[in-house]
Amino acid sequence: MPNSVQVENLTKIFKAKVSGKNGITALDNVTLAIEKGTIFGLLGPNGAGKTTLIKILLGLVFPTSGSAKILDTDISDFNIRKKIGYLPENHKFPNYLTGEDVIVYYSKLSGFEIDKKSPKITEVLNLVKMEKWRKTKIKKYSKGMMQRLGLAQAIIHDPEIIFLDEPTDGVDPIGRKEIRDLLISLKNQGKTIFINSHLLSEVELVTDKVAILNEGKLIKFGTVDELTVNKQLYEIKTDLPISTELFRSLIENYKITQKENMISLEISDNSDLNKFLDELRKSSINIIGVNQKKSSLEDTFIQSLTEVKN
Ligand SMILES: Nc1ncnc2c1ncn2[C@@H]1O[C@H](COP(=O)(O)OP(=O)(O)O)[C@@H](O)[C@H]1O
Ligand SMILES: [Mg+2]
């Protein structure tokens, strides 16, 4: 698969506001590649450098060093922007505009002339489920509606790559599901999608690859499965909660927590599950069920951030 985005040794140091002080290293020698037709998630806590990376790729911020290509074209070539869609973080459209005004206005800004009667507007507004609100002023919109309109604006010109900065921030669960479904359908049309997010549980449901950025450094890169494979979590249901005494003896050898009659066990070696179950049976505990829980990206994320600190 060819790459849609290629980033090489990208560093961005923002100059200090007060002269003599050190600048802020927002990106520190970041290298990564995103395959065409995939959904990529860039994760990291606030201030990690996620927005800076997107802005550099869009040509809105200049890198201090390093280079990047989009669809094999260097980002310094502005023509590439025609093939890019962008939903900025915390975007604010002028609130006296209606939904369709916003689409017309922003498509003009991207050099793509369109008028209110264009069927293309109806098509994208239907896609983001905003058609019935097109004549409503956006000051009446909820955060979820604003994000959906923002998405419509980002895809009106049929871009090949779509950059979304915190697309589900402040959106309710149903709205998030709708946005996820939309991203998957865009991917199925062959688009490449780059999502910045600090909401990991959202991203792991749709992404093919993820990277974790912390203090400007890329600390992990891989598929969600690759990043969460190292440990396994099991939930073991017993008929009664186990005694404090037994719990104390088990915790010496196993990573466990207990909540009523449910024990959570974390193992890195498969044979440990059976050993643990044998211990329970030896103590005459009735096991009602064993359930494997996938270790979530959230855990890996927190773990890799603590590893960096230590
Ligand atoms: N224009 C700017 N001038 C100075 N510092 C900036 C600027 N933009 C971002 N930063 C700093 O760069 C770091 C990364 O910011 P950002 O890319 O917005 O992170 P994220 O999107 O991951 O929250 C932060 O420390 C931020 O304060
Ligand atoms: Mg940001």
Image (cartoon, grey):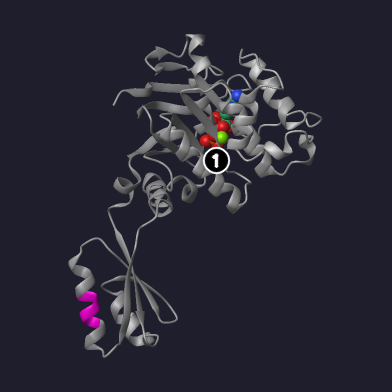
Find residue 285 and report its image quarter.
bottom left
Name the outermost residue toward the right: 96
> In front: 304, or 116?
116
According to the image, label 1 marks what residue? Answer: 46
Residue at point 60% right, 30% down?
A: 123
From which residue to which does the magenta span run? 275-279
Mark 1 residue type: Asn
> In front: 280, or 251?
280
**Can you tell me whether the CB of the residue at mark 1 lies under 8 Å from the nearest atom of ligand 1?**
yes
Query: For residue 32: magenta?
Result: no
Q: Is residue 262 left or right of residue 104?
A: left
Decide if residue 23 is in sight here.
Answer: no
Label 1: how many Cα within 10 Å (few below 14, some 14–19, many 20+): few
Decide if residue 141 is in sight here.
Answer: yes
> In front: 179, or 114?
114
> In front: 165, or 184?
184
- What kind of element bears circle 1? loop
Q: Is residue 33 left or right of residue 49?
A: left
- Tell me which image quadrant ligand 1 sits in: top right
Residue at point 61% right, 25% down?
A: 120
Find residue 36 and report its image quarter.
top left
Query: For residue 276: magenta?
Result: yes
Position in image of residue 172 (x %, y %):
62, 51
Q: In this view, does 102 lie above or below 66?
A: below
Position in image of residue 106 (x %, y %):
66, 21
Position in image of residue 144 (x %, y %):
65, 44
Q: In this view, does 206 lie above or below 102?
A: below
Which part of the image, by quadrant, shows the N terminus?
top left
